[in-house]
Amino acid sequence: MSVDPGVEDWLRFTLVPGIGGATQRKLLKHFGSPAAALRAPASEVSALLSATAASAWRAGADVSEIGLVLAWLGEPGNHLLTLADAEYPPALLETADPPTVLYVKGSVDRLSMPALAIVGSRNATPQGLSTARDFARALGSAGLTIVSGLALGIDTAAHEGGLASSGSTVAVVGTGLDIVYPARNRDLAHRIAAEGAIVSEFPIGTKAIPSNFPRRNRLISGLSRGVLVVEAAIRSGSLSTARFAGEQGREVLAIPGSIHSPLSRGCHALIKQGAKLVESASDVLEELRLTSLAEEAMDPVSDDDPLLAALGHDPCDFDTLSQRTGLPVGSLQTRLSELELEGKIACLPGGRFQRLPTN
């Protein structure tokens, strides 16, 4: 794959250490292009910068880092989108802090399609994982691309649901695209790159630095029409994504849960603050004003099994279930084992059981 000659100017421009997006946009506004800024006298550029940034500009970008990115761009399926490109996601251009360049692995077109972000806890419950997967599959089948952050837990389930639909999925990551983090999601990342897209504002070679992930969250919301939060503690990165969504004029939606679960408190807090309470995929489409797609979104169907009805939707221990159902111990154990094998319930630590949403 050949690389556009102008790409190297963008890399020399954006890979200068200590020159952030706001400063880059300031220079682009003044000079018109990276090439013009790079050709301008250092004194003219320095006049627009702080002393520290001016010193960094004079030192310039690391040549080896530029070479690393150019080599990566030479591989099939890898792209660099700049603010000057027609393919740059229009949704991000509406935000206050669009990255000057985006590194993309996979389908560039996927970044400009109607999208919904689904985010939540890394330590999700089995029910939360199933809910995220089901909503992503239903909403993806209705025509939305599912955006998330490739983290373990809810993010992983959302990507899996998106891949199971026609809408596919986009992963926004906080590392360079030569790195998969967490490593456990390597196979998932390969599938996303083949069927959707992985995107980052961070250069090739960027490690998993904690401060990068909150910055990544603004892109998750920025690419999307709304953010759906599924299970989140009161102190959660998912809530920062929801906050970015509100600041960017996106819809904020949340799925309520048990009042006894710490992973419901973040969602309940969002709902108290005005987020849309979501019980079905149709609720999401209505809030996004996409009701014409509602027929395509299939919500989970309830199960009439009396044991499932007795279990309810909160975790429940064996003794309580025995009291609710009146079943003999042996019969109850057998039926619980059958339901677990059928994927209708999950066995939780402490001898508790929890109902899973029906597909």
Image (tube, rainbow, N blue to C red):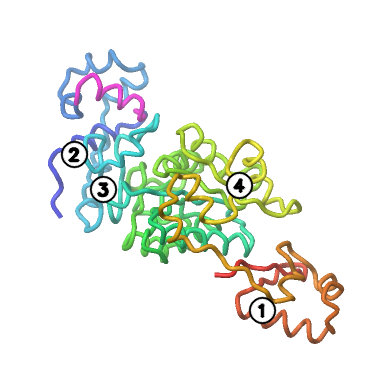
Discs 4, 1 touching: Cβ within 8 Å: no
Q: Is residue 54 left or right of residue 126?
A: left
Residue on which the image places disc 4:
277
Rendered view: 92 above or below 230: above
Q: Say which of marks 1 and 2 sits in front.
A: 1
Between the residue at mark 3 and the residue at mark 4, the CA separation in whole angstroms equals: 46 Å
Residue on which the image places disc 1:
339
**Magenta-colored stretch includes residue 114:** no
Q: Is residue 243 left or right of residue 223?
A: right
Q: Say which of marks 3 and 4 sits in front.
A: 4
Magenta span main SS:
helix
Tell me, for residue 68, which label it has, or none.
3
Between the residue at mark 2 and the residue at mark 3, the CA separation in whole angstroms equals: 11 Å
Q: Residue at x 66, y 72 (%)?
A: 345
Is residue 144 or residue 340 the one in the foreground?
Answer: 144
Is residue 162 or residue 64 the one in the foreground?
Answer: 162
Rendered view: 48 above or below 20: above
Query: Which amino acid type corresponds to the residue marked 2 in the rendered image?
Result: Glu
Query: Which amino acid type corresponds to the residue marked 3 in the rendered image?
Result: Leu
